[in-house]
Amino acid sequence: MIMPAEFVTVTAAESGQKLVRFLERRVGSDVPRSAVMRWIRKGDVRVDKGRRKPFDIVKEGQMVRIPPHQTEATVKTDLSPLEIIYEDDDYLAVNKPAGLPSQGGTGHNDSVADRLLSMYAAAPFKPAPAHRLDRDTSGVLLAGKSYQGQKNLSDMFAGGQGGKYYLTIVRSEWTGDRWEDLYDFMEKSAVKGHEKMIVGTGRKAHSSVFPLQITKERSLLLVKLHTGRTHQIRVQLSSRGAPISGDSKYGGGKGKMKLHCWRIETPWFTAECYPKWNIEIPDNLRVIIE
């Protein structure tokens, strides 16, 4: 399908991003960046009737000409909506179900990113996940509803800021009755075909753990992340003889993995949601983390 040339107005949500990125978000994945860059350099793209460079910043109210282009992508409309737990003009927080990837990819017909595109198909700035949760991890996941919101979240996570708290059930009797800091160095396993992380000589990983319920067979733990390494909580707990229930990759056996992102704190808002597990969760978690 050939899309005709169109003139679009930069919205407040889109203001502040580079022209090339603005165009990529507007035309979608059908047009590669090389083609978008070529449009701009040839003068096929105009901003307020004038030529611009690819990395010039667009501002609210500017009129942008998008040239004719071929499109084949269609927004998936049959996807289940995500549960929204926080929303304003710039930010969005959803409750990611376990088993749903954060981003689409080979072999995945459904993801948080796909569902956000479906839910906000008419929005000029399409929300996208600002970070990832493992496929089998549930809980709070954040997205930006405006360019500035997306940038703020990306900068926050890149800078290791914000508070991230998880709830998990491990298959062991946890020892201790107060906050305990876990320090490790993590690296990828060298075994081909079995990609996983191990405690080794890689990058520093730091978590804090507080036991909420302890029995001989299992324990309910509250975990605060200080760093964000791949599979960090799963590896740090498993290496201490406390694999997460259902985490077959790291010794937790079969079943649904019991790892849930309960709360994320940002400078602009806080979002939280509780897991739907068949276990009583204490109602004083906010007191514990203070």
Image: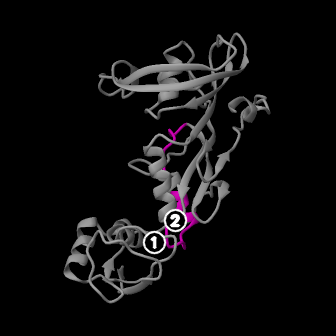
- Answer whether residue 125 is magenta in the image: yes
Q: Position of residue 123 (x, y in %)?
A: 54, 72
The quarter of the displayed image where residue 118 is located: bottom right
Confirm or deny contact between disc 2 and disc 1 (CB under 8 A).
yes
- State the residue at coordinates (75%, 32%): 287
First along the sequence among labels 2 and 1: 1
**Span of residues in magenta:** 114-136
In the displayed image of the protein, which residue is found farthest to the bottom? 49
| Residue 153 located left or right of residue 170 | left
| Prevailing SS of the magenta stretch | loop
User: Residue at label 2?
Assistant: 146
In terms of depth relative to the viewer, which is nearer, 248 or 51?
51
Q: Position of residue 274 (x, y in %)?
A: 71, 39
- Above or below residue 80? Residue 62 is below
Number of residue marks = 2
Q: Nearer the viewer, mark 2 or mark 1?
A: 1
The answer, for residue 128, to whether it is visible in the render is no
Q: Tell me the distance, in whole angstroms, between the alpha carbons under discs 2 and 1.
A: 8 Å
User: Residue at label 1?
Assistant: 15
Q: Secondary structure at mark 1?
A: loop
Give amino acid for label 2: Ser
- Answer whether residue 116 is magenta in the image: yes
- Above or below residue 217? Residue 71 is below
The answer, for residue 190, to whether it is visible in the render is yes
- Above or below residue 61? Residue 212 is above
